[in-house]
Image (cartoon, rainbow, N blue to C red):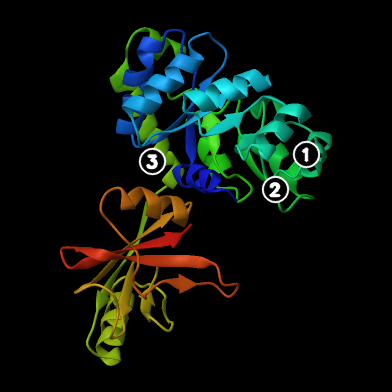
Amino acid sequence: MSDIFKRIEELGVLPELTLHDAIDAIPVGRAIADGGISMAEVTFRTEAAEDSIRLMANAIPGMLIGAGTVLTIEQVDAAVKAGAKFIVSPGIHDEIVRYCLDKDIPVIPGVSTPTDIENALRLGLSLVKFFPAESNGGIKALRAMSEPYPGLRFMPSGGLNEDNVADYLRSNKVLAVAGNWMATQEMIRFGDMQGIQNKCARAVRLMLGFTYDHVGLNFPKDEEAESAAEDLARIFDADMYEDTAGFFVGNFFEGVKPGGPGLYGHIAYRTYHLGRAMAYLKEKGLTFDNPFARYDEDGRLEAVFSDQEVGGMSLMLMQQ
């Protein structure tokens, strides 16, 4: 996977922009970034696309910008020259795909059928756009259609909104999602930058799906951790069990055995995607480089702990 695709997966949600006037590019781009999303796709549906990409790329250096609705090689060249880092198209145009691959330009063409997918695989692609997603059966159709192709990832687009985006992002087949609900034509036309920022922030929250799980308190001895867990289990008439890390009561408390992270313990949250959550929290100054990470029996990361503490408590992230 290219570094660009890895970054798209970390960010998770790609706002699609159709800008009729390049003067809107910088304020819209900043509103998206202020909402917590450092990328955008500017569609080549208007004559302002090339200038909009150039202005946004120059004014917001940390923004990952792609060009969408790319239908010709000339548009590929114009987009890349303006500062676009990846190309998105509504369907598979063999000539455009081969041109981008030969130039080492990340390209994400659209598919809607198994025949499209097999054509994408024949061309050597590992990421495609499922478009238009909702009109083609939504997440249920994507799950069924993608099953025979385990090595392929998808970026659904078309009909996505706040009500269904989380359903897509919970699928391991989905690398990221794209949509225009975060910056609609009406919002852009009326200069509603605060509304765009709010929509993007809401999309990030839906993408990460943070939910509180439990608190873990550190104890100097196994017996003390077990005793505290037994008391809570008795008081709340809850189940208690032991694992290698500590003694658990229901789904709300862990008596941590000696040597656990944090001065006093940890506060655990679940998330839909550990990689996205860690990338998001890194922007807020948190790192997860300590040796307390946990893996499942297949070697997949299932939990991490922050190096930094809040009130003496490490923050634990768990895969939902």
Identify the element where label 3 is drawn.
helix
Instruction: Compare residues 252 and 86 and report the one nearer the observer.
Output: 86
The first of marks 2 and 3 along the sequence is 2
Locate residue 112: give its quadrant: top right
Residue at position x 65%, y 28% from top?
134
Q: Where 146 sits versus 256, above or below?
A: above
Above or below — where is 132 with respect to 294? above
In x, y percent, where is residue 114? 81, 38
Q: In screen coordinates, is 76 left or right of 314?
A: right
The numbered disc on residue 303 is none
* Residue assigned mark 2: 152
Say whether marks 2 and 1 touch (CB < 8 Å): yes
Q: Amino acid at mark 3?
A: Arg
Per the rendering, the mark at residue 117 is 1
Quarter residue 299 falls in: bottom right
Alpha carbon of mark 2 to alpha carbon of mark 1: how far?
9 Å
The residue where tag 3 is placed is: 205
- For badge 2, the amino acid type reads Leu
Task: Judge whether 20 appears above or below 44 on screen.
Answer: above
Mark 3 neighbour density, 10 Å: few (under 14) some (14–19) many (20 or more): some
Q: Residue at x 36, y 23 (%)?
A: 196
Report whether 220 appears left or right of 24. left
- The correct choice, above or below, for 63 with respect to 174 in the image is above
